Amino acid sequence: MLPVRQVLLPISSTSDIPLRIAIVGCGSVVERFHLPASMLIPELSIEFLVDRERSRAATLAATYRVPNVATDFREIIGKVDAAIIALPHNLNAEASRGLLNAGVSVLVEKPMAFNAAEGKQLLTAAKHSKVLFNVGYTRRFSYGVQFIRRALRENLLGRITKFSVEDGYPFDWKSAGSEFRLDKTGGGGVLLDLGCHVLDMVIFWFGAVTVHSALHDSLGGVEINAVAHLETPLGLRGTVELSWERLLRNSAIIEGTAGRLEVEWYNNSATAYLSGSMLRGTVAPEGSKQLVQTFDMMFVEQLREWVRVLRGKSEGDVLATGRDAALVLELVEACRSQGKIWQPPWSSTEREKLLQ
């Protein structure tokens, strides 16, 4: 049997006809990133905005001149070529599954599902309908994240001996509605939210990894601090640390027999120690005049690559697949099931403030 990707047909081979797109969910990430980014992609025609609060969808539709609004994703079936899904974490899977089963290609915000079991159902739906199923891991389009991948592929650091990834900051994201990320049944905590991005970066760099051990401070609710000790199939070990109450290093440090590399993905600065010399600078594509990369730019690049994949013009080795995202969900669940309860000494008062 051929792999799923080889039996998929492009949506349209005529590049001058825009793809008809619906956006399901009209929360902050859509207002701040998806809609502005989509306006810069002429190959996309946003035909529908879908939100259970019709007034919110209508307001954004008027701002961005989207012709149709709906309150249920089922209303768009048969009227669009593909859909972007950006709902609270516990709702992504239902909408994705319904659209995939109806033959609509999907780009869903991370996490694609609330747990690994739901994730497997989505993979089955995509395989059965032979449509494309991708997940919005925008960090794959960060200059710094891509630079690390290239450095590893080109053996810049020799044999890798260890890696350390830290991502953390005091939580300040404001949702359009209630803050579902801090709700155990709706958002799932730092591992399912921020952790999905970070674990996907590790997969992007090293391929499949497993959890060797973990710590987290869920205490029966959501975790806001976590540490995972990971291992690659070749036995390489490294750590990932996450926090929603402390400003961490926000970088990846990778050490090898030929040198050491540190990259900060929020500003794409890099420091390398090679052959006894230190090199420091900002990572950007060769020949690029744009050294400062914003989150907005990463969303634009992700949509451009999605269009190329939908058109059958790209292998999509950067854009995350459902299979990549399924592995991330398995890692999140392993961190929780194997993780020992951890109560950091700095955490008691700050944690209570965050969860109020």
Image: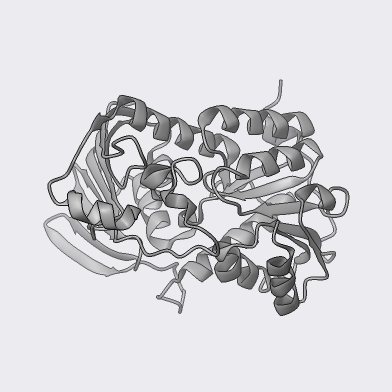
Q: Is residue 134 above or below residue 278?
A: above
Q: Quadrant of residue 231?
A: top left
Report the residue at 74% width, 46% height from top: 105
Q: Quadrant of residue 289?
A: bottom left
Residue 148: x and y in percent read 35, 52
Q: Is residue 151 visible?
A: yes
Q: Is residue 313 visible?
A: no
Report the residue at 69% width, 47% height from top: 106
**In the drawing, does residue 153 fall left or right of residue 239?**
right
Q: Residue furthest top?
A: 1
**In the drawing, does residue 66 fall left or right of residue 111?**
right
Report the residue at 28% width, 36% height from top: 219
Locate the N terminus by quadrant.
top right
Q: Is residue 29 above or below residue 320?
A: below
Residue 238: x and y in percent read 25, 37
Q: How many discs mark residues in the rendered view?
A: 0
Q: Is residue 288 above or below residue 304?
A: below
Locate the C terminus by quadrant.
bottom left
Between 264 and 29, the one lying in front of the other is 29
Q: Residue furthest front?
A: 356
Between 100 and 15, the one lying in front of the other is 100
Report the residue at 67% width, 54% height from top: 84
Between 95 and 160, the one lying in front of the other is 95
Give the colour scheme of this rendering: one colour
Residue 27: x and y in percent read 59, 62
Q: Quadrant of residue 20?
A: bottom right
Q: Residue furthest right?
A: 78
Between 338 and 254, the one lying in front of the other is 338
Q: Is residue 125 above or below residue 257?
A: above
Residue 119: x and y in percent read 58, 33
